[in-house]
Image (cartoon, grey):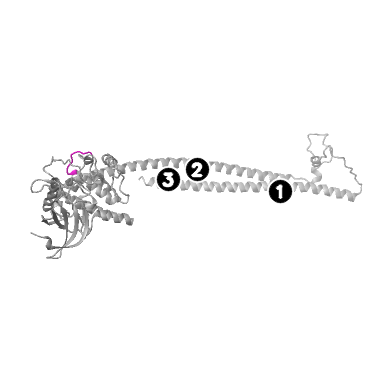
Amino acid sequence: MPSLADYDIVSSIGSGSYGTCKKIRRKKDGKILVWKELDYGMMSDIEKQMLVSEVNLLRELKHEHIVLYYDRIIDRGRTKLYIIMEYCEGGDLATTITSMKKEGRQIDEEYVWRIGIQILLALKVCHSRLKNGKAVLHRDLKPANVFLDANKNVKIGDFGLARVLNHDTSFAKTFVGTPYYMSPEQMNYMSYNEKSDVWSVGCLLYELCALRPPFMAANQKELASRITTGRFARIPLRYSDNLNLVISTLLKVDESQRPTIEEMLQHPLIVPRLPATKSTGEARRSSATVSRDEGYSSRMESLRKSEELLVDRQRELRLKEKELESRERAVSLKEKLAEDKMIRADKLMRESTEKLATLNAGMKPWSASCDLSDSSEDDDKPQSCLAKYKRPPESPKKKVSFSLDKENDGFYMRKLSGFSHNTEQEMELEKMKCLLELQDRLLLAKRKSDALRKIEYDSNYRARHLLSGIR
């Protein structure tokens, strides 16, 4: 039988209502271990029974992800019990979450998957039948009770609240555990079974992602209401939908819809991540059929969605084709209007040229075209040049004298002749300006026509490009 003398106390790790936990060194080989020091002298009979249950459970529960039990020492003189267990130098998940929160960092998703699978594998041993045909509920799964070794692998411990169930239909009824991780059936004071541990795993994985429990409240009544309702926010978006789906599956409010540990280990999203062992080979084979069926269903769903997208695309192409046709008709109409304008402009230019040529050919000298006689005698005669410049009636009369001097008479005739020629030159300049303006307008119309032809060409090219995708 081992004794206290076989160990040296290295340091104190922590203390609680159960007693104290200390780091020790075994003298014979220097191995670092931990002992839980419990004072059973002041315990009630029920508490003593729980203590005995934990010791017996720790002896039987042997798994790489469960804290290993080494021995126990009973000091009857001081009514103390020392439970010697494996030392987890990586701390616990509660410490990890706290440090991540302080540093403003997030836990890597792959590590969350790894922690979740290792907890499920450990609980599979607990929920499986032991030698006496009984299953074990942990009932207090929380980050502080999930320890880590040097390689950050899971070691579930603290089975002080664990309860043994005799058979499948057994249900626990006691209200124990940490409220944040209690299942809805526990909060409602209803009977519960191994699926309460499944709920706690979901809460624990959620907290690893969000760095807070999924259900929080100021008091226990409000907390119970939120847990039984089962509404919680999605884990941060940096985590995948697959991980969010697994957590949501674990946190089913209806206990009948919540899977067991065995069912979770056969989940298609978990099986590929299981470590390669004999025990997982069967789970992978059993889930292969389900995976194939789900894969076929997913492919059919994907094909259906692709078909819907194709139909929508064809509908859009038809609409675009109709739009292009309407645009082509509009461009053709504009082009026709431009051609009509060009024809009218050419015709107008020819007519103007002909009129100008006719005017130049029929132009007479001033003496022949201007008649100084009174035009009132014959209204049918063309009006004289000077008639256009009649004196207004209200203007004062001007005295005009004509000299019989031939030299002066020639001077006035040259003046009048120059006035008439100047007026004709101005008319010719105006006509030339009109012709130049008309030519500019014709050039602008031609440019617009070229631009419309280019638009029509581009539209036809885009239409052919779009329609080529349907073929």
Q: Secondary structure at mark 1?
A: helix
| Residue found 90% across the figure and 49% down from its top | 406
Q: Quadrant of the N terminus?
A: bottom left
Circle 2: element type: helix
Question: Looking at the figure, which quarter contains the C terminus?
Answer: top left
Q: Say which of marks 2 and 1 sits in front.
A: 2
What is the C-alpha distance between the residues marked 2 and 1? 39 Å
Q: Which mark is residue 429?
A: 1
Q: Bin the neighbour count of mark 3 within 10 Å (Cα to Cα): few under 14, some 14-19, many 20 and up.
A: some
| Magenta stretch, residue numbers | 188-195
Q: Is residue 126 left or right of residue 352?
A: left
Q: Amino acid at mark 3?
A: Ala
Instruction: Name which residue type carries label 2.
Output: Val
Identify which amino acid the numbered label 1 is placed on.
Leu
- Confirm whether the magenta stretch covers residue 189: yes
Give the answer, above or below, for where 14 lies relative to 379: below
**Residue topped by disc 2:** 331
